[in-house]
Image: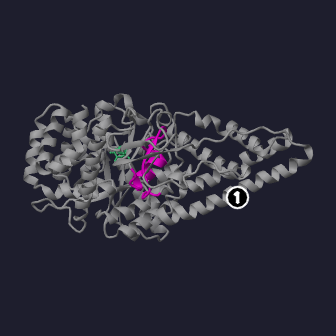
Amino acid sequence: MTRKKEKILRGIPASHGFAKGYVFLHRSYLPELNERTLEPKTVAAEVQRFQSAVRSAQRDLRRLHAQVKREMGRDFAEFIGVQLALLTDEEVLSETERFIKERARNAEFAYTETLKRLAGPMTKSNVPFFQERALDVVDVSARVLRHLLGDELPSLHGIEEGAVIVAHDLPPSQAALLDSEKVKGLVLEGGGRTSHTSIIAKAKEIPAVVGVESVCREAREGQLVVVDGYRGLAVLNPSRKRLSAYESDIELCQRHRQSLSLLAGQEPVTADGKMIDLSANIEFLAEARAALEYGARGVGLFRTEYAFLAKRRPPTEEEQFKVFAEAAKLLKPWPVIIRTFDLGGDKVVPGYVESNPFLGWRGLRMCFDNIELFKGQLRAILRSSAFGNVKVMFPMLSALEELRRAKLLIKEVKRELRKERVKFDEHLEVGVMVETPSAAIMAEQLAQECSFLSIGSNDLTQYTLAVDRGNERVAELYDHFHPAVLQLIKRTIDAAHRQGIWVGLCGEFASDPLGILVLLGFGIDELSVAPGFIPEAKNIIRSIDTGSAAKIMKAAMGLSTALEVKRLLRRELHKRFPKLAEFLFELEIAES
Ligand code: PEP
Ligand code: MG
């Protein structure tokens, strides 16, 4: 028998890690539905049948909500609240009932036709936010149809140990219930790095690749597949040679992780004794717990847009306060640095869509035009500061006046709270994210007027190199190690230190072992990384002394291209961690 050829499909790495498993094809499309004309006397009963199916779906969702809340936290469960809202949307329900009554058609048909008309434009949208909502619509309608048809729609129940789910899309309600003991990986045709499903996969540490064109057509049920969540590859039917290379990678990865777990009780201190504030980037409260378990010394970046995106409306001051206060209590005495809304860019919300979003109405700029929304968030942050060590920072700043204006607002909010006799930390520290070249160039002036700087290298790279961070066509030009980016990072760190304040970095650069080598050489004080990367970061920090790191940095700064810089850093990493370097770079080198 001839062995089937291997096929390598490329996508977007959504959750790091390697997985080997068997294809579990999951079809989440809706079944073909027949159109039936009703006898006039059965119309009323058909409306009742529809209402009862909606009630049953509502019961399912409430149960699911309780389960996700229990297992993953309240804020994680919010998207189910969104689905409940979609399910009980007045317009959809009344239009469907009218369709049944006026056209005497069966409930399944009436419901799908109504959804097609009302939600159809959303499914065709290029805007990630609307695409994600379209998935929620499919998820909700599948539930109602299942009750109407008394039918089992495709489900992930009964999935076997060792499965890799291959699907066009996976609704977040199903992703949230994935059992990471059984499900080894996830390969999706749709989705983006910022989709709920990608975020959930990361939180559950399930390796995932999304945006993999035609994987559903190419994959066969039960076929062997390797998921490479580092480089965004799905390898169907891997050749023996590739499989054994990946197998040793997987083993290496596991052994490496085990060895890292031995560091759990150790501090993130360099070999010559410099303590680095190693903290975590989070979007949801549940991640704060994971961060603590991994040994984080606080939260260095709490992205607050997700509460907005999950709800489809601005969260109220009260809702935000509860989450921030809970995080503050949980992390105490470690700091929780809350970043104010960074909406715009790729984190789009309805009503705030524009044609050139990354250079447009984003972050602080949008907040200044929505003062009530902004003040509500500042109030929530200040109020939560009474419960722990809370700090605030502003994103996407390009001029000093923006910092001054935001600080004036904080002053105003403090006055209001004092008047209302509400407690807060009078000395709440205010920081600035350095994410634009202008902010990096003006770092000295910014540092004079705030308590800390946090470098947002994801955006700093995109704006310095004029490369859209989400555009696959120019992805090769997007490189944190570009000498221009490194110079701006160094300049920012030096400026902060000259002004006597601390400086951190919370972009993906800090979650790259090579990036950590450079940053230690630059004298960084804080690193904020994905919770799962904390043990790795600690390992690197502990292995090097600041003098050696400074030497490496000096050599790197003498180079002219990103490639030269990376080669140098790889050699240095290889000297200290031969196994880690092999595991991280061997396949990459083999491929290039
Ligand atoms: C960054 O830009 O580096 C950053 C941390 O912010 P975000 O990725 O949320 O834009
Ligand atoms: Mg940013």
- Mark 1 residue element: helix
Nearest the eye: 34 or 369: 34
User: Residue 260: horizontal and vertical position, in percent?
Assistant: 23, 60
Instruction: Answer with the quarter of the image where residue 473 lies.
Output: top left
> Quadrant where the N terminus lies?
top left
Q: What residue do we see at 15% from left, 47% from top?
A: 573
Q: Is residue 121 left or right of residue 40?
A: left
Q: Residue at x 48, y 48 (%)?
A: 197
Q: In what quadrant of the picture does the C terminus appear?
A: top left
Q: Is residue 192 magenta?
A: yes
Asked whether residue 249 appears in the rendered view, the answer is: yes
Q: Amino acid at mark 1?
A: Ser
Q: Residue 220 in the image: state x and y as whole percent.
A: 48, 38
In the rendered view, tell whether residue 239 sits above or below residue 367: above
Please identify the quarter of the rendering in which residue 332 is found.
bottom left
In this view, the residue in front, 47 or 78, is 47
Expressed as whole percent of the image width and height from the top left, the position of residue 139 reads: 60, 48
Question: How busy is the neighbourhood of tag 1: few (under 14 within 10 Å), some, or many (20 plus)?
Answer: some
Residue 85: percent from left, percent from top: 64, 53
Give the residue drawn at x 19%, y 45%.
Answer: 582
- Which residue sits furthest top? 473
Q: Which residues fall within the magenta stretch?
A: 179-206
